[in-house]
Image (cartoon, rainbow, N blue to C red):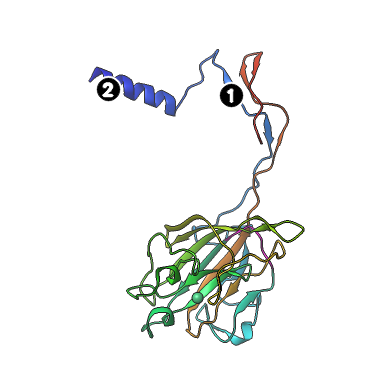
Amino acid sequence: MKRRLLTVLALSAAVAPTTPAGAEEYLSGIRWEKPPVVDPGKTDDAPPSDAVVLFGGEDASAWENQENWKVEDGTLISGKGYLTTKQEFGDCQLHIEWSAPTPPKGEGQGRGNSGVFMMGKYEIQVLDSYQNETYADGQAGAIYKQTPPMVNATRPPGEWNTYDIFWTAPRFHEDGSLKSPASITAVHNGVLILNHFTLLGDTPFTRPPEYQAHEPRGPIALQDHGNPVRFRNIWVREIKPPVGERVRDPYLRDGDKETPLPKQAD
Ligand code: MG
């Protein structure tokens, strides 16, 4: 019992260290800029103050081909042809909500099919995957033909599904060769379904995935797959990493005494 108590004490000391006088403090040597303040809104699904609202319930003018889709009851309904944003995005956080037609019609890939195409090329599948069998790497939340989602968190048709997508764009060398692949993390209805998945390339139906050099930014597109899938509350934020500058090597500080630490890679 005594030993256990000591272990607990030791653990809590490690988790929440105090800084008594005379203790050394670790300093990284990086001067960080203050992160910009973002107003997150009243709820987690509201567009934060630095988001671009792509569809808030009425105005679909952020999209090309909107005249061939329908705005009804605050929702955007899949129509003829893909819907494509006029603005282009690179690394970004995308929030989008979708609802499969009810009553459900069709089977497999024919039931509530649409898709969110990052940079117009890389599809995260939208499908009515509630009690609807299809191939795993084609169900809702799949990176089409590359990976299934880790779990199926789809709500029944007619209810609203949320995707929160965290996208890192691929990078290309000047000669067009791949410098770093795209990756994606996605949360479906609050459930993690893709965890920093590295894409093998684009997501066509008829050939293997491949990378072909493209611009650092591209549009977000929504698929027309012949099913009247509804969308709402679509917003996107550019991802900008924290800004810092190494001004010296890391060190330990104890009052006026400084002990240099080995150089670290930034
Ligand atoms: Mg699709």
Q: What percent of the width, then of the height, locates residue 138?
A: 45, 71
- Bounds of the magenta segment: 88-93
Question: Badge 2: how crowded within 10 Å, few (<14), some, or many (20+)?
Answer: few
Q: What percent of the width, then of the height, locates residue 261?
A: 63, 22
Q: What percent of the width, then of the height, locates residue 259?
A: 64, 16
Residue sticking out furthest to the left:
1
The residue labelled by disc 2 is 4
Question: Badge 1: how crowded within 10 Å, few (<14), some, or many (20+)?
Answer: some
Q: Quadrant of the C terminus?
A: top right
Q: Between residues 183 and 244, which one lies in front from this camera angle?
A: 183
Vertical arrangement, residue 74 with respect to residue 198, above or below: below
- Please report whichever mark, 1 or 2, sits nearer to the chain's N-terminal start: 2
Name the amino acid type tagged 1.
Tyr
> For this view, does 265 lie left or right of residue 24?
right
The residue labelled by disc 1 is 26
Task: Report helix, strand or loop for mark 1.
Answer: strand
Q: Quadrant of the N terminus?
A: top left
Vertical arrangement, residue 123 with respect to residue 241, above or below: below
Q: Estimate the spatial distance between the alpha carbons at disc 1 and disc 2, rounded to whole Å.
A: 30 Å
Q: Between residues 79 and 36, which one lies in front from this camera angle?
A: 79
Task: Report helix, strand or loop for mark 2.
Answer: helix
Name the amino acid type tagged 2.
Arg
Is ligand 1 closer than 8 angstroms to the Cβ of mark 2?
A: no
Residue 192 in which image quadrant = bottom left
Q: What percent of the width, then of the height, locates residue 244?
A: 69, 39
Residue in the image at 48% along x and 83% along y: 228
